[in-house]
Amino acid sequence: MANIIFASNNIAHMLGAEVSTTVNTFDPDLVPYSLKVSSGSLAAVNFAKSLSSETWTHFRMSSPTVPGTDFKAVYYNVFSLVERTTNKVLLKMEFCDDSGPRLTMHNGTSTVTGTLPAFTFIQDIPVTVDIRYESSPTEITITVFFNNAQLYRTTLTVVGTSPGQFDQIVFYNGWTYVKYSEIIVADADTRNARLAVVKPASTGFHSGWDGLLTDLVDDNPITGMSTTAPATKLTANLETYTGGALISNLVTASMVSSGVNGPTNLQHMVRHAGVDYNGASIPVSDSVEVVFTDWTVNPGTALPWTGADLAVTEFGFESIV
Ligand SMILES: [Ca+2]
């Protein structure tokens, strides 16, 4: 599958989001809650830009409330894809039950509008959204899928300088009831993807870091574990995984920041059958960031991940100078 750039269903990774435990807004076999945005505000997910010519955005939207008359005839902001350096909104989607979702797209100099076929939101039935955003110096092609069906495709000719790739998704509270879950950004196809969250449950073979393991999983970015020394390892056994038997990608996500004199790099780790495997070195700065390692195969078996692997594999991280 694709290389995963961002994968999360955690409010700590989504600035401004709140937890919703309303039934039917998330799949409890996979994730612990859905994410909501309070009235009048927005929430943002930041990530590194895709290194390929395309970026795929994937998430589920669900409403526990029948869309009312407030959802008729008026367009409401739902989400946008933003290039943070220039603060350009490369794509914005608005919903209107009568007229179909509307896109506003940046062609490098100005914006272009497109309207999708009418789409009726049904209470308690999640909608999976996938957006393929292809960008070259001369053309931008945008393809929108709802529930894996292609609803819209357009190619814009770049005017001036291509806006390139985006590195932020902003979710709006334009429509009060909608909840989001299973957010994935990747450099290739995300259709059919599902996201399961599995958290550390107990300390594994390595326990060199200071602090409590429970502070890694409380969704509170203020609490965590620390070390002042390089080459310090921490691995953990995971809680029981209840998703599918086959796993296309396994992504380790950590929220990290460095202290004044502490190590300035981190490697995610897999420990399988008593052997440690380290991911790429990740620079850690003094600002809090969410960093990811995409283990496309189990390094212990050199085979694709299975659900059964998760019960016998430890996951963690090592501090690097
Ligand atoms: Ca914490």
Image (cartoon, helix red, strand yellow):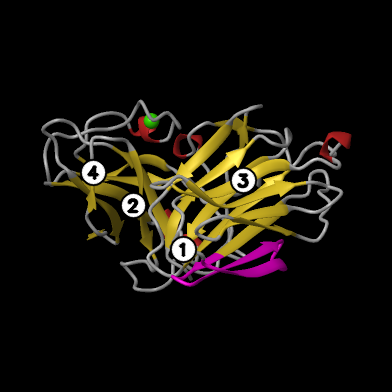
Q: Residue at x 55, y 54 (%)?
A: 195
Residue 24 is one of the magenta-drawn residues: no
Q: Which residue is mark 4?
A: 284
Residue 139 is one of the magenta-drawn residues: yes
Q: Comparing marks 2 and 1, which lies closer to the viewer? A: 1
Q: Which amino acid is tagged 2?
A: Glu
Q: Are marks 1 and 4 in contact (CB under 8 Å)?
A: no
Q: Residue at x 85, y 42 (%)?
A: 73
Percent across and percent down for residue 292 are 36, 52
Q: Comparing marks 3 and 4, which lies closer to the viewer? A: 3
Percent across and percent down for residue 26 are 66, 44
Q: Which residue is mark 1?
A: 160
**Residue 160 as seen in the image, left or right of residue 175:** left
Q: Would residue 18 be visible to someone looking at this image?
A: yes
Tell me how far mark 3 sits from mark 4, CA to CA. 29 Å
Counting residues from the start of the chain, the first of labels 1 and 4 encountered is 1
Counting residues from the start of the chain, the first of labels 2 and 1 encountered is 1
